[in-house]
Image (cartoon, helix red, strand yellow):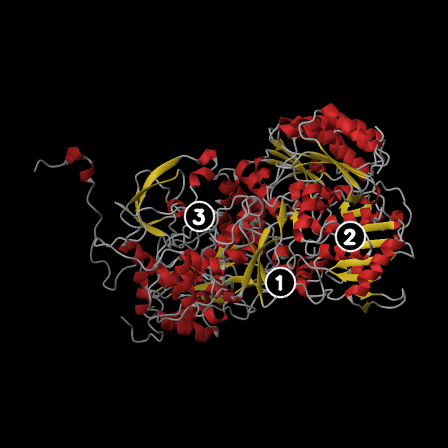
Amino acid sequence: MRAASVQRPASRLFRTSAALSAGQGTHIHRDSAGNSESTPWEWTPESLKKIDMYLARYPDTPQGKMSAIMPLLWVAQQQTDEAHATIKAKPSYDGAFAFDSPQGSGGWVPLAAMHAIADLLGCPRMAVYEVATFFTMYNRNQQGKFHIQLCATTPCMVCGAYDILASIEKHLGIKCGETTADGTFTLTEVECLGACVNAPMVQINDYFFEDLTPQSVVKLLDDLKAGNPVKIGPQNARVHSLGPLGRTSLKSPPKGPYCRDLSQIPAN
Amino acid sequence: MALRAVREVRVLLCKGEASAGAKQFIVDKYAEIKKAHPLLPFLVREASGAAPTLTARFAHGVEKVVPLSGLSSADVAKKLSELGSASP
Amino acid sequence: MLAALQARAAATARPGRVSLQLLHKGARGVRSSDARASSAVQPAQPSQPAAVSAVVQLDEAGFAVLPKELPSMRGVDFKQELDPRYAETIEVIIDGHPVQVQKGSSLIQACEQVGIQVPRFCYHERLSVAGNCRMCLVEIEKAPKPVAACAMPAAPGMKVFTNSPIVKKAREGVMEFLLANHPLDCPICDQGGECDLQDQSLFFGSDRGRTTESRRGVEDKNLGPLVKTVMTRCIHCTRCVRFATEVAGVDELGTVGRGNAMEIGTYVERMLDSEISGNIVDLCPVGALTSKPYAFTARPWELRSVESIDVLDGYGSNIRVDTRGGEVMRILPRLNEDINEEWISDKTRFAYDGLKRQRLDTPLIRPDPEMPLQPATWKDALTLVAQKFKATPGARIGAFAGPLADVESMLALKDLCNAFDSEAIHCDVPAGPLADCRAAYTLGSTIAGVEEADAVLLLSTDLKREAPLLNARLRRRVYHDGVRVASVGPRVPLTYEYEHLGDSVSQLLELANGTHPFCKVLAGAQRPLVLVGTGAYERTDARGVAWAVQKLVTSVPALIQDGWLGFGTVQPTAAAVGALDLGLTPLASSAAAGVGASDGAIAEPLGLVYLLGYDSIDLDRLSPDAFVVYQGHHGDVGAETADVVLPGSAYTEKVGTYANMEGRAQRTARAVSPPGEARDDWKILRAISELAGKPLPYAGVDGIRERLAAVAPQLADGTESIHAVSPDIAKAMLAVRASDKFDFDTKTPFASCIDNFYMTDAISRASTTMASCTKAFAK
């Protein structure tokens, strides 16, 4: 089933997948200026606290310690996620959720961090490389300040995700998988982010920006670059995932939980 | 024992009973022989299936071979001294 | 090619059945399920090939019709060969036939035991089970789907079908998936002709493909100058990863990414820094990992194979020399469970191009000390040498046998020199404990016996470079059984954890006196093992070190007991044990070369120096009027300084006996002819003896073997077995130590005798591959 504006072929060559998700890097490490074996890496005190907490969960054996590779990679990624604080999240409605600490999607794991993890756990470096390359959530290349992750799976595609992609690419002047020259934005295409009702949408660092149009996404990017406060969640007037007709069911609070107290069941 | 003229002694042993005497001779007397003649090569080699022999090599490659099968340790000692005092 | 195959199959297999086994034997012959070798001499072909049929006759139910009696491997009742610990058998029903298989084997092993080869890519006998290729699927009755035979243990009463329609369909499906992403590289791929993927798709795959999509491409990785990688061909069996991690101890290879984008590589560009890295070329079932020096040079069906022995180190690995048109094209390992299993070191594998460079192919005479060497005839050269033998008094004749000399030529050399009243026949071994007792210079526990040790002390050895395969065996002991290894010597990475006790003579003295804490470990072990590298004896205080080693060995009773001789010297050269067995004298120290006597006393300067492939001659110690004769196969240092050069044969060009470090005598075979005028070494010496008027009492091969049987019967019986030293004799003879006081050099640390693993002898020094390895891996 194709939407009219889709320009891509129905079948895609496998080899292009890796390129489009270049935020995660290829499966070969290439040294670059800030990312080589000799780049220094120091854990911050907060990271060290988290590391202790994670290590305490696993047995102190060589195999056991290797279980800590995954959380420690995330700690490293969180440590490098500095851009989070710059997104001034303006809640669009009561109770909209905003993170108060970096979750990690804007960060990345340098090679030096992987080596530090291997040294800390006493495991071969290859074990850490294998885990880091297996999961796409670990970014192995430096991201721009804002990591735009565009979902282009079925519901979003049908609702025009590729138009959003084209608009972003035109506005920023980069192709999917690349970072802008000033290092502000990295654009990658990712799998379903689970916000299908609010398609099309993007995730920038840890926040979802949903219900996009080619124009609103441009405004969003400009606001982010300028450091203005941005509304997270739907970029139009929608509240949560409400449909266009508003709430059509569950209009009143539910009746009491009489089923839970069996003594309250009426005789019939 | 006088082994002046001998340049090299080779003792070949087999694994079985036939070399028992020769083995005992080596175990008992090797230290003594070596002390008296520290520079004399006294090669002891074992091989299953070999016939136990004692070979003394003199100058110019002349070798005298003595079979040791079934001999006792004392007999072997006697044979060795015979070889040592024999002229090449 | 098919016709030739069918003709061969008709000649040796049952009529009407083409044997997969034969196909592999002709091409690669190194299958793990090939020849279960004992230490006896192996025949060139298996006596009974496994009967896996390609042309299958089916009965009505669709099951394969197999003979009433399933042949076991090589026609031998496998039960007799089993270690009694594993002799228990269970019954499984394979293809309708109830058979007894070894308890604890997996289905794939059970099928092999009865002669059925289940196709596989990722399973390898010597590596852990991965189970990711899915090619070994077999059907088990009442199982919902086919199971991987490599991972399923055989249970009593299990009914296994290896040729049912489901299994056939599974194999075709797996093959189709593997080929879907596999590039169409056969014409340019070195593995063509000996490729598991080709063979198994021929026998088990479908005859047509359905792929219309593009195939994935993968970047090639740089693993060093030895292994060529074309990673697009990789089928991700992970054999190389498992070998590198488990056997070689190198954790650099791994699988990065997942799914279609998975790549085998080192992630960060790194070379495979292991002395046995070349074995992944054998392991790789496809052409992803191939030999870089061998790339694009030959096809396997053009090659003729000869079974021989490697002489570039003291290990005695069994090899197969593949030649084409009189040229050695490559060297592959041969199975020998007791020595090298299925592996060979990189030097053994890749130094063969040194056989074609710097070769001596004509006799040379230097007419005048100022002039260069001139080509001459054999007659002139031999006559000149014979004259010198006659003219020089015995005390001034000296001979030196090099690291690649075979036993027959060393015997002839000794006899020749002895006939001229010379006692100064030396070999390229530093003097350690007296070579009167064989236990003083051989590996008493034998190589396979090293796996019985439960505490190991290494002395002055870098085992990883002196005997990499022995090191791999020790690694297995450390990680499978937790054996403690301690080392007094250079602090080097050994691919496993060991305790480094120090590198000075003081630690050795403490161990010898029993005051070192590690003595308790040795004393408490049932089968302790002390391995001494010859680097311990290449020192000024070598005699003192030998004294201390003997003291240590005789002070721990468990080291020399009935059934276990736990003392071994790691000899780095192939000629060492043979030379000492024959009675050649070691050098007092390597610096004494050129002067003679073994006890270090300065003898008369030599007038006639005969070098049998000996290139470590110390030119400063030669007297100016010394007449140097060099007999060898490479124009190395020795030939340059010689007055007469006599061209001999290299190890691939002669039948020679070499004793490895355990004292096992093995024979090389003649794969190619020596170049030009070169001849067999011992025959040259025989000719000299005849011209000099004292002909040696043997003129043919039988004659010299008879003489060898008289001098050193343990090298002559041709059974490739080890003749162990009796414990009483070893104890009595090793207890004899000089009682002098020694000056120990506590400042010089114990070092390894090997400086550069890739260049240790004339052949490897002449090899360009070894030169590029030295450059690449130089520390």
On-image quarter of the C terminus of chain B: top right
Label 3 crowd (10 A; few <14 / some 14-19 / many >=20): some
Image coordinates of residue C703 in percent, x first then y, are 68, 49
Q: Chain of mark 2?
A: C
Q: Earlier in the sequence, mark 2 or mark 3?
A: 3
Image coordinates of residue B23 in percent, x first then y, are 69, 28
Which residue, given by chain and number where applicable, does mark 1 sit on?
C672
Image coordinates of residue A142 in percent, x first then y, are 54, 62
Say whether residue C641 is visible. no
Residue C227, by quadrant, is: bottom right
User: Distance from label 2 to label 3 (Cα)?
Assistant: 47 Å
Q: Chain of mark 1?
A: C
Q: Up-down: is C276 above or below C85?
A: below
Q: Nearer the viewer, residue C412 or C374?
A: C412
Label 2 crowd (10 A; few <14 / some 14-19 / many >=20): some
Q: Which residue is rendered at x = 71% and y = 27% of the image?
A: C555
Q: Earlier in the sequence, mark 2 or mark 1?
A: 1
Q: Are marks 2 and 3 in contact (CB under 8 Å)?
A: no
Q: Earlier in the sequence, mark 3 or mark 1?
A: 3
Image coordinates of residue C700 in percent, x first then y, are 68, 53
User: Distance from label 3 to label 1 (Cα)?
Assistant: 30 Å
Q: Nearer the observer, disc 2 or disc 1?
A: 2
The reply, left or right, for residue C308 in relation to residue C502 is left
Q: Nearer the viewer, residue C234 or C703?
A: C703
Q: Up-down: is C31 above or below C302?
A: above
- Mark linked to residue C74: 3
Which residue, given by chain and number where applicable, does mark 2 sit on?
C695
Residue type highlighted by circle 2: Pro
User: Distance from label 2 to label 1 (Cα)?
Assistant: 29 Å
SS of the residue under disc 3? helix
Q: Nearer the viewer, residue C259 or C355?
A: C355
SS of the residue under disc 1? loop
